[in-house]
């Protein structure tokens, strides 16, 4: 390659990494990332309150015990991960994936949600607290024409949107795309044309969905909190991976080996498994980071 072409190539790389993505698509985990108080178990526990006397649905502890038994059986001979790569391998384990999906299928087949009421779910949703600054962030993204999607292992698209509706100003909750399994029967909770019910039981599922739906030429920003989010935080197509919470599982895993940059301190460059990620406590820090 000629010296001039080499120089231009290097300048292109430096320039592209020196500034935040100009027009990204942003994907967000939900539990622990957006919602900072319990949202996942509030859904089935609210359904139990709506069951008629004499219901044959097993207690919630039955489903918990069955899941933990499956998880322990699947992980019994797997080594405890001590590196990022080992944690990524663990999160991609087929047996652990099966334990997650079987848990969903077991509860779905039980009939737990057949009598749950919209009013009970709306009341429970109003008690879920969101991470500070979330709606300011969504409003800023919308003003820039940036698409924001929630992509979650939670069990209901419509439940997530109901939680968001409980605190959303100006109907901002209606603008979000939500990718998630759906355990609620049809007709329970209002639907939205941006609901995208589908199987999401691992970080790998999130990566595959992002690859499929991201717009042509768009760069991906992903925000998550748990080790199940480690893949979509650190691996492509994500170019800006952000951890929600300094003490979250993914934060602890990443900072053992790599950088964890404070989002409120501004742009440091693109992220990845070889460099690290950003971390935020307040969603307004992401506005600062992306400019």
Image (tube, grey):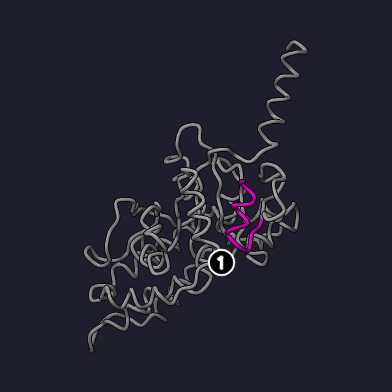
Secondary structure type for disc 1:
loop
Relative height, residue 73 to residue 200 (above, below): below
Residue 165 placement: quadrant: bottom left
Residue 95: give x, y in percent of width and height: 49, 58
Q: Residue furthest right?
A: 3
Name the quarter where the N terminus is drawn. Answer: top right
Query: Is residue 81 left or right of 132 when viewed as pictured?
Result: right
Instruction: Please give the name of the residue rendered at 72% of the width and 45% of the height, measured from the top-left corner.
Output: 268
Query: Is residue 267 located in the magenta-colored stretch of the structure?
Result: no
Residue 118 placement: quadrant: bottom left
Which region is colored magenta?
279-291
| Nearest to the observer: residue 245 or residue 197 | 245
Query: Is residue 286 located in the magenta-colored stretch of the structure?
Result: yes
Residue 244: give x, y in percent of width and height: 60, 60
Q: Which residue is mark 1?
A: 132
Instruction: Please give the name of the residue rendered at 61% of the width and 53% of the height, measured from the top-left corner.
Output: 242
| Nearest to the observer: residue 265 or residue 60 | 265
Q: Crowdedness of circle 1 by 10 Å Cα count: few (<14), some, many (20+)? A: some
| Nearest to the observer: residue 41 or residue 178 | 178
């Amino acid at each position: 390659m000629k010296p001039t072409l080499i120089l231009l190539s290097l300048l292109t790389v430096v320039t592209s990494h020196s500034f935040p993505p100009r027009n990204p698509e942003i994907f967000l985990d939900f539990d622990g990332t957006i919602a900072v108080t319990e949202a996942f178990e509030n859904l089935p526990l609210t359904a139990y309150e709506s069951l008629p006397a004499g219901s044959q649905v097993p207690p919630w502890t039955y489903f918990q015990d069955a899941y933990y038994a499956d998880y322990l059986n699947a992980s019994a001979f797997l080594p405890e991960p001590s590196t990022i790569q080992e944690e990524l391998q663990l999160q991609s384990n087929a047996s652990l994936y099966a334990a997650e999906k079987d848990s969903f299928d077991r509860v779905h087949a039980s009939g737990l949600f057949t009598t749950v009421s919209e009013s009970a779910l709306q009341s429970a949703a109003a008690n879920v607290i969101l991470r500070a600054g979330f709606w300011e962030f969504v409003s800023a993204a919308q003003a820039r024409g940036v698409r924001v999607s929630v992509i979650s292992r939670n069990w209901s698209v419509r439940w997530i949107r109901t939680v968001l509706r409980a605190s959303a100003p100006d109907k901002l909750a209606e603008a979000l795309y939500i990718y998630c399994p759906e355990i609620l029967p049809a007709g329970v909770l209002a639907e939205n044309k941006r609901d995208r019910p589908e199987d999401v039981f691992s970080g790998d599922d999130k990566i595959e969905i992002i690859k499929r739906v991201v717009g042509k030429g768009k760069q991906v920003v992903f925000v998550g909190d748990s080790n199940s989010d480690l893949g979509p935080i650190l691996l492509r197509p994500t170019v800006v991976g952000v951890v929600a919470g300094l003490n979250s599982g993914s934060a602890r895993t990443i900072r053992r080996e790599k950088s964890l940059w404070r989002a409120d301190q501004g742009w440091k460059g693109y992220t990845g498994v070889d460099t690290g990620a950003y971390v935020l406590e307040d969603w307004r820090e992401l506005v600062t980071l992306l400019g």
